[in-house]
Image (cartoon, rainbow, N blue to C red):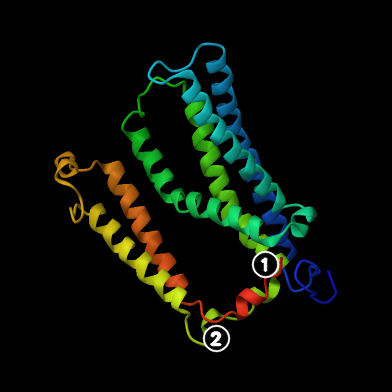
Amino acid sequence: MTGPVGVAGEQTESGFDRRWIVVGKVAGYSAALAMSLYLLVKVIWIVVALLGNGPDDMGTTTWVVLNAVTVGMSAIGVTVALALTQNWGRRLPARPLIFFAWVGGGFLVPMLPYLVISGILTALRGGGGGSAPAWEGFLIGFGFLGMAAGLAVALPSYLRQRWPVAFQGRLGDLPGRPSWFALLAVAVTVALGVLWLCWAVGGTLGITPAHRAGGGDLNDRLLNGSAGLWALVGGRSAAGLKSREIVATIKA
């Protein structure tokens, strides 16, 4: 537990609480396990379709191709989750690893509040109906929730271990001014956030007359509200990005 902090990817555990390293590993393994269950369901669907028992409302080829794509995506998710827990994960090129982890986290982590609230409301209303077996719905839901929750913990832990310098101090203390790219990102995310929140409370700005007639159910409003709040959080975070000092600490 002693020793200096070295270059990116070579630092020891000094200066970083070992408990959070353990927590990050547990979260990464949990995310990989959860996504493996989702992957299993997709593989079963493909096998069943190839045996001649595919869905009636979709051709076998289309069904197999669509699920094969999700199998590939979930396999990448499992690999990324494991990379966040293993020593070999620190030796991987930084850019592709961060890209897949950040995109996966960006899609799944903001869905956590929505999935929890939606699941509770569905249970209170007596289930969601549908013809799919209950175990399939459980494994799919558990896969998304588990992957999202695992990434929310494992990814920050991994980043802190590999690039400790980037997590020292506060973004506001960095020299320089916000870059034009950061300001553009703030403007776009805040604009989208306000629009989504407008839809969440019943606004119709930008909605076509055909969609206005539907009125938007509670599920749509929950999705829009969740997206709007997270967009504002993202805009606030992007506003703190300034010069390239923090980027320079991340070396592939």
Mark 1 burial class by Cα count in 10 Å: few <14, some 14-19, many 20+: some
Coordinates of residue 213 in the picture (x, y in percent): 14, 40
Vertical comparison of 93 with 64: above or below: below
Count of numbered marks: 2
Q: What amino acid is at disc 1?
A: Arg
Coordinates of residue 94 in the picture (x, y in percent): 68, 61
Coordinates of residue 224 in the picture (x, y in percent): 31, 51
Q: Quadrant of the N terminus?
A: bottom right
Q: In which quarter of the image is the C terminus?
A: bottom right
Instruction: Tell me: 217 left or right of 169.
Output: left
The residue at 48%/24% (across/down) is 63
Vertical comparison of 2 with 189: above or below: below
Tag 2's secondary structure?
helix
Q: Mark 1 points at which residue?
A: 160
Q: Name the residue under label 2.
A: 173
Mark 2 burial class by Cα count in 10 Å: few <14, some 14-19, many 20+: few
